[in-house]
Image (tube, helix red, strand yellow):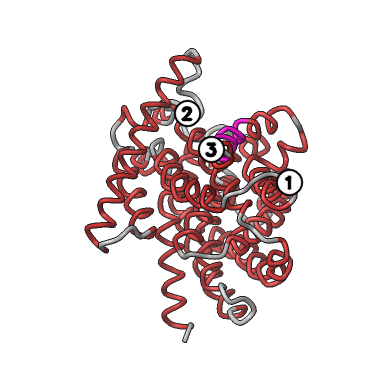
């Protein structure tokens, strides 16, 4: 009975967390991912309630690929290629900057943490795509739960400082050495992207039905990925499963009916919260404390180094300040922060390309982060 109650609680509690984020300012600042870690941690180690490691493991194994499928369904890759040439160049420079800085930081700090090569890939993922990529890469590399949790905490701290700069003085500073944004003539490109819009006109019952369909499609993608793993490795292996889910989901996003399914991105975030609850419940406090300094040093070097290098390359390639900032926002934070940053920049024209860049980053970050980790391990780990 306790196991059943744990399943029910961990499946339902993310709804409570998401509602809390909407209603409470402090919870809104922390965000659903961080709160899920915290509540999962408290549930397993502080609250006097029955706890099953197997339940947490099962939910982790299911929630990550399901979340990735749902998050990727809304990617409009072709619209991004068509309407965002400068954003594509700027984002490409961001990717190069993150990979260079992650590699250099690993060489410097590789002896300070036993999982430094995994962390370099995880931070590559989060600063090209987002938190789901950090989680997925850490999971594929079999990083310790404490390592993933500490990496997430360090990212929240460093990126929080950067967000403050973006919302205050970043644009004024960059305009000192980057050109200003040149507005384009009005065009219907806003119609090529639907993130956050589709589904607003539906009733709760209709939306629930649409979400059920998207879940079944994500489940079919997951089952197909399991099949690929069994055919290629003869066993259930997380790396081919996650990579196959990414490829299949991105391929399905080219089908308009799939891409325009309502609220798939938000539904994917719900499964990320389930993962974080499970991960938090498996985390040990003493290991977090011992990991903090080394992980923080690595994260700080990668994030701030890549931001500075990206802006220097933007200056070299004469990319305007607004485009440089919005693609940096897309990589560091993901699609959700494009709107607030674009508002501060007083530039509505960069919203579509910024959001799409964030989703494209999420689509490719797993491959780049995982690949970098294995390259670093091959050349530097004896």
Mark closer to the observer (1, 2): 1
Q: Quadrant of residue 148?
A: bottom right
Task: Assess disc 3: are there few (<14), some (14-19) or many (≥20) residues with their C-alpha within 10 Å of its C-alpha.
Answer: few
Tell me if 101 is positioned left or right of 264 in this view: right
User: 10 and 256: which one is in front?
Assistant: 10
Residue 38 pos. (x, y %): 69, 47
**Position above or below: 330 against 204:** below
Q: Which mark is residue 63?
A: none
Q: First in sequence: mark 1 or mark 2?
A: 1
**Position above or below: 184 against 115:** above
User: 193 and 65: which one is in front?
Assistant: 65
Mark closer to the observer (3, 2): 3
Q: Which residue is mark 3?
A: 4
Which residue shows up at 62% across the image and 48% down it? 51
**Does any portion of residue 171 appear in the rendered image?**
no
Is residue 10 magenta-colored?
yes
Q: Which residue is mark 1?
A: 48
Task: Assess disc 2: are there few (<14), some (14-19) or many (≥20) residues with their C-alpha within 10 Å of its C-alpha.
Answer: many
C-alpha distance separating marks 1 and 3: 17 Å
**Does any portion of residue 223 appear in the rendered image?**
yes
Which residue shows up at 71% across the image and 53% down it? 45
Quadrant containing the N terminus is top right
Outermost residue to the left? 231
User: 163 and 169: which one is in front?
Assistant: 163
Is residue 378 magenta-colored?
no
User: 104 and 299: which one is in front?
Assistant: 299
Which residue shows up at 63% across the image and 32% down it? 18
Residue 186 pos. (x, y %): 46, 27
Q: First in sequence: mark 1 or mark 3?
A: 3
């Amino acid at each position: 009975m306790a196991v059943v109650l744990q399943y029910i609680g961990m499946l339902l509690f993310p709804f409570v967390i998401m509602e809390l984020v909407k209603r409470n300012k402090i919870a809104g600042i922390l965000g659903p991912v961080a709160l899920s870690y915290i509540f999962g941690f408290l549930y397993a180690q502080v609250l006097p309630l029955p706890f099953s490691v197997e339940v947490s493991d099962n939910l982790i194994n299911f929630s990550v690929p399901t979340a990735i499928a749902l998050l990727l369904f809304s990617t409009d890759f072709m619209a991004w290629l068509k309407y965002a040439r400068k954003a594509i160049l700027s984002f490409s420079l961001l990717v190069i900057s993150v990979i260079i800085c992650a590699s250099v930081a690993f060489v410097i700090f590789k002896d300070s943490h036993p999982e430094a090569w995994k962390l370099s890939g995880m931070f590559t993922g989060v600063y090209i795509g987002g938190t789901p990529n950090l989680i997925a890469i850490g999971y594929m590399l079999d990083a310790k739960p404490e390592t993933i949790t500490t990496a997430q905490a360090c990212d929240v701290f460093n990126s929080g400082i950067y967000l403050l700069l973006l919302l205050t003085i970043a644009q004024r500073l960059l305009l000192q050495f980057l050109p200003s944004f040149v507005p384009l003539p009005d065009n219907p490109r806003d119609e090529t992207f639907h993130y956050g819009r589709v589904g607003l006109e539906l009733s709760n019952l209709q939306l629930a039905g649409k979400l059920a369909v998207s879940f079944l499609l994500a489940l079919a993608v997951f089952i197909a990925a399991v099949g690929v793993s069994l055919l290629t490795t003869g066993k259930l292996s997380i790396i081919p499963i996650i990579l196959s889910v990414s490829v299949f989901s991105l391929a399905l996003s080219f089908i308009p009916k799939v891409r325009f399914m309502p609220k798939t991105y938000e539904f994917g975030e719900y499964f990320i919260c389930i993962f974080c609850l499970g991960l938090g419940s498996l985390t040990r406090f003493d290991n977090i404390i011992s990991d903090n300094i080394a992980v923080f040093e690595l994260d700080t070097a990668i994030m701030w180094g890549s931001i500075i290098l990206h802006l220097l390359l933007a200056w070299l390639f004469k990319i305007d300040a607004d485009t440089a900032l919005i693609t940096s926002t897309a990589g560091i934070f993901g699609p959700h922060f494009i709107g607030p940053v674009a508002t501060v920049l007083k530039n509505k024209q960069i919203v579509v390309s910024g959001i799409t860049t964030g989703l494209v980053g999420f689509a490719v970050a797993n491959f780049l982060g995982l690949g970098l980790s294995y390259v670093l391990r091959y050349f530097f780990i004896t």
